[in-house]
Image (spheres, rainbow, N blue to C red):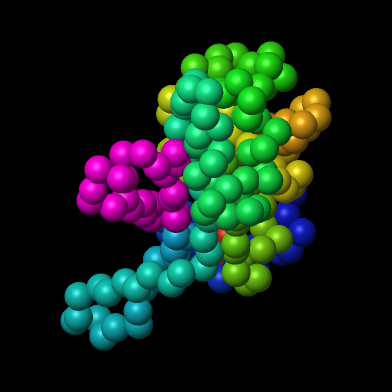
Amino acid sequence: MISSKRSVDELPGDPRRLNLEYRSWRFVSSAGDRNGFDEWHVSVRSNRFLDRPKWSATETVQDDIGSMRLFRMRTDDRFSPFPFADAESHDTGLSNLVLGVYDLGGGGYRQEFRDAVTSADGDLLVLFDVRLDEAWRGFGLGPVLVSEAIWTLADGCSAVIAADPLWESVGFRRRVDPLGHLMDPATEEARDLRNERRKDLDALADAYRESLRR
């Protein structure tokens, strides 16, 4: 269980009313089929009720409280360093992050990567950027939200990589150079940690509702 750095009384709202919205887009053209990755933007939103007269219907609004950006790099075993080349042309930070995974000379994944994962036949998911409003920080929600986003998008992926070492509680482990921080979704440890983070959310939400009764 992740310990909170702040009192549950400081929570801006009910953690069970948080939701994630996933968005991705591609050009409607044959050129879109040649892109080496899919870019995903995940919005973190909090539902809250508006104060309304008793005789009025309940109305809720959604506040944007954070976001995540992930990339799904599609498998390609050709000699070309695709999809790394597409990552390089898109964002230098992204290309630097995946540089240690791809064999730019022979194509496909490096042998170090193949040795580190259960199966190297899938795509690569990249956790690129995470943002959470300051009012919601310090309660252990970051790992909960990251875990949910990863498991929603990681189906069919060999691994997930991240630049930030903050996400060990989600399942990321520092691997041999040049791989960096990597999570293998096929491992029992990764699945167990997903369940633990969901239990953390339930415990935090229960504590929040209990605090409202005081």
Residue nearest the observer in this picture, 182 or 52: 182
Q: Is residue 63 visible?
A: yes
**Residue at x 72%, y 19% (from the top left corner):** 112
Magenta-highlighted residues: 21-42
Does 38 appear in magenta? yes
Q: Is residue 88 left or right of residue 155?
A: right
**Residue at x 40%, y 42% (from the top left corner):** 35
Indicate the position of residue 81 as horizontal and vertical percent values: 55, 32
Please state the total of marks drawn on the protein image: 0
**Residue at x 63%, y 71% (from the top left corner):** 135
Q: Is residue 214 visible?
A: no
Residue nearest the observer in this picture, 196 or 131: 131
Indicate the position of residue 8 as horizontal and vertical percent values: 65, 62
**Residue at x 67%, y 57% (from the top left corner):** 139
Indicate the position of residue 40 as horizontal and vertical percent values: 43, 50
Q: In the picture shown, does residue 145 fall above or below 37?
A: below
Q: Is residue 52 left or right of residue 174?
A: left
